[in-house]
Amino acid sequence: MNTRILGKNGPSLTEIGLGAWAIGGAWDFGWGESDDDESTRTIHRAIDLGINWIDTAPVYGLGHSEEVVGKALKGIRDKVFVATKCGHVWDEKKHVRRHLKPDSIRKELEASLQRLQTDHVDLLQFHWPDPDTPVEESWQEMVRLKDEGKVRFIGVCNFGVDLLDRCEAIAHVQSLQPIYNMLERDIEKEIIPWCVARGAGIVAYSPMQSGLLTGSFDKAKLASDDWRITHSEKFRGEKYSRGLRVVEEVRPIARELGRTVGQLAVAWVLNNPAITSAIVGARKVSQVEANVLATGWSLSQRDLDILERSLSYSSA
């Protein structure tokens, strides 16, 4: 699988990273129940197919995703670049809140290291901004953790240019993890140019819009506690209708290329040279086997022009 460098003087990551959100199983923002044995087989299959990095977070399953990843990587930890996050904490009632106080960041990392069964994290990222904590205080703690060797690289998720500037003034932001797909392209205006100018890598999450752009999405098959039903506005009303229109517009293009709609959606994200890697979730072996087929080929300018016209038409 092709690799790209994550930011200035960064690590080499495969164009697809394995997203471990759904592996966390059922919780308030989960994807329904998952089978840990199948999740482990999926992780091993992803590595066998050449994927060299995994993205997880403490909050995914309230620790469960990291535990599954840690067990799956036992004995092969040095073969995989592990990215996790901080800034989401929960109480005994499983209520989650954003929290990026320095002492909390350190406490979260120590818990992550135990669950992941490792002595360091390759990439530690702020999960979401915390409006109640000055970002400078939070970022300085990340720098300290990096200096101590507990973290190799530090990055952020879901940050705008203002917060990125404030972090960069203290220490280099190695990476940004934003949402980016055919339906959500806001980062093209300011965020991508900022990252390119400053040498910050971009790992895009939700390249298939949480399954909507797979071409085989069926809301009726989702678990009743799946977050896409219980919490997401993207899966109802006009946003959902537009997503379905986009799928039907691009389906003939995917068919002509001999790919699925989902593979085309991921390839479209990777066509942007500013994107280091696309985080593609999977909790079944068949899913990861399909996902890797989004790489190893490229879209022609003709294909891109047709896609752009289709996306514009579907928005009308």
Image (tube, grey):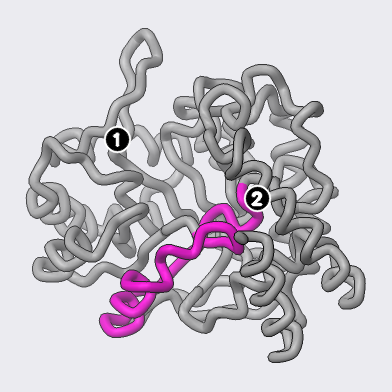
The numbered dot on residue 219 is: none
Image quarter where the C terminus lies is bottom right
| Residue farthest along the bottom direction in this orientation | 301
Choose top left, top right, bottom left or bottom right for residue 122.
Answer: bottom left
How packed mark 2 is, by other alpha carbons closer than 10 Å (few <14, some 14-19, many 20 or more), is some
Residue 205 is inside the magenta segment? yes
Front in this rendered view, residue 176 or 303: 303
Task: Identify which residue is drawn at 26% across, 68% down.
Answer: 173
Q: Amino acid at mark 2?
A: Arg
| Nearer the camera: disc 2 or disc 1 | 2
Q: Earlier in the sequence, mark 2 or mark 1?
A: 1
Question: What's drawn in magenta, residue-wise?
Answer: 180-209
| Residue farthest along the top direction in this orientation | 93
Front in this rendered view, residue 46 or 136: 136
Q: Are marks 2 and 1 in contact (CB under 8 Å)?
A: no
Q: Residue 82 location in percent, x, y?
A: 48, 55
Q: Is residue 17 visible?
A: no
Image quarter where the N terminus lies is bottom right
How packed mark 1 is, by other alpha carbons closer than 10 Å (few <14, some 14-19, many 20 or more), is some
Which residue is under mark 1?
A: 108
Task: Identify which residue is drawn at 85% across, 49% down.
Answer: 286
Q: Is residue 67 visible?
A: yes
The numbered dot on residue 242 is: 2
Task: Identify which residue is drawn at 68% across, 18% down.
Answer: 224
In the depicted structure, whether residue 279 falls above or below residue 192: above
Q: Residue 152 location in percent, x, y?
A: 33, 63
